[in-house]
Image (spheres, helix red, strand yellow):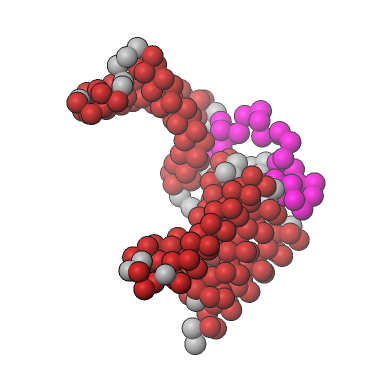
């Protein structure tokens, strides 16, 4: 089913795990299950200490999948949020409860955002194969695959349109302020035309390669869970059970 989206880049370095800290070590099925476990733990667990341990677990998960850049970025962000949280809590007498609530909400949702970021950056074809193996409708899995595959292209097209309009003097701060609808039209129309062309090319490629053929399909990404997959799932399952027990 996903052959038209795989392409030659499916054999690039990183898709075959060769170490615990190498990118794409974990299966897409594991990433989906980890996200579900983290969402449940964040909802069931207390803010302290379960929320803190869950945040550290999500940071370790980023490091385990090889996302060292995300690990550094989210680690710095969590450090700043925790610093602000303790500062606002000590200054609660100054009427900063509103800001304290937003910091609490951001820290509560931080593990979910970190784990979701890993899933979004997964190979779209691998994610589609896992959704097919879980019995998800082919229309849904196809939509998810196309959205993840072409979201970076859409963002790139938007930046290119912005740059072209700015160079021609058609998109300036003055025009954005005085004629917002006209500025929006100048951005949306070429973006829609480009998206329609990409959709037509994609549809023709899909039909040519038999995407509408009924029956079960195999995928080069389908693989059983490894030892590392089971270890990371057991870790987050333990956090879920601990969070659930803390509410009793």
Q: Residue at x 53, y 83 (%)?
A: 246
Residue 237 shows in this picture? yes
| Quadrant into which the N terminus falls | top right
Decide if residue 60 is on the left or right side of residue 153.
right
Residue 62, compared with residue 237, is above or below; it is above
Q: What is the number of callouts on the image?
A: 0
Residue situated furthest bottom in the rendering: 248
Of residues 30 and 161, which is closer to you in this image?
Answer: 161
* The quadrant where residue 54 appears: bottom right
**Secondary structure mostly seen in the magenta stretch:** loop
Q: Is residue 210 above or below residue 117?
A: above
Given residues 225 and 40, the one toward you in this image is 40
Query: Over which residues does the magenta segment extend?
Result: 1-26
Q: Can I make out residue 67 in this image?
A: no
Q: Position of residue 23 (x, y in %)?
A: 70, 45
In the rendering, at what x and y percent does residue 167 appear?
38, 14
- Residue 74, x across and y down, in percent: 57, 52
Name the quadrant containing residue 15.
top right
Instruction: Say above or below: 16 vs 62.
Output: above
Q: Is residue 6 left or right of residue 89?
A: right
Looking at the picture, does residue 13 appear above or below residue 158?
Answer: below
Q: Residue at x 60, y 73 (%)?
A: 239
Side of 185 relative to 229 (left or right): left
Q: Position of residue 19 (x, y in %)?
A: 79, 49
Relative to the observer, which residue lies in front, 205 or 121? 121
The residue drawn where x is 54% and y is 49% is: 117
Residue 7 in the magenta stretch? The answer is yes
């Amino acid at each position: 089913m996903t052959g038209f989206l795989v392409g030659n880049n499916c054999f690039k370095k990183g898709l075959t795990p060769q170490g615990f800290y190498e990118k794409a070590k974990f299966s897409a099925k594991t990433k989906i299950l980890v996200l579900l476990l983290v969402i449940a733990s964040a909802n069931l667990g207390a803010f302290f200490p379960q929320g803190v341990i869950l945040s550290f677990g999500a940071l370790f998960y980023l490091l385990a999948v090889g996302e060292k850049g995300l690990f550094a970025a989210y680690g710095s962000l969590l450090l700043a949020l925790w610093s602000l949280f303790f500062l606002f809590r000590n200054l609660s007498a100054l009427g900063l409860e509103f800001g304290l609530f937003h910091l609490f909400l951001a820290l509560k949702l931080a593990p979910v955002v970190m784990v979701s970021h890993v899933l979004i950056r997964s190979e779209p074809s691998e994610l589609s194969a896992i959704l097919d193996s879980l019995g998800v409708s082919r229309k849904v899995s196809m939509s998810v695959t196309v959205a993840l595959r072409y979201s970076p292209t859409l963002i790139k097209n938007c930046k290119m349109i912005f740059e072209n309009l700015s160079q021609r003097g058609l998109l300036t701060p003055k025009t954005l302020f005085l004629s917002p609808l006209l500025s929006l039209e100048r951005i949306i129309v070429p973006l829609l035309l480009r998206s329609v062309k990409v959709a037509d090319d994609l549809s023709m490629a899909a039909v040519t390669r038999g995407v509408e053929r009924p029956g079960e399909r195999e995928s080069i990404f389908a693989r059983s869970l490894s030892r590392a997959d089971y270890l990371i799932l057991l870790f987050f399952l333990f956090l879920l059970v601990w969070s659930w027990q803390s509410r009793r």
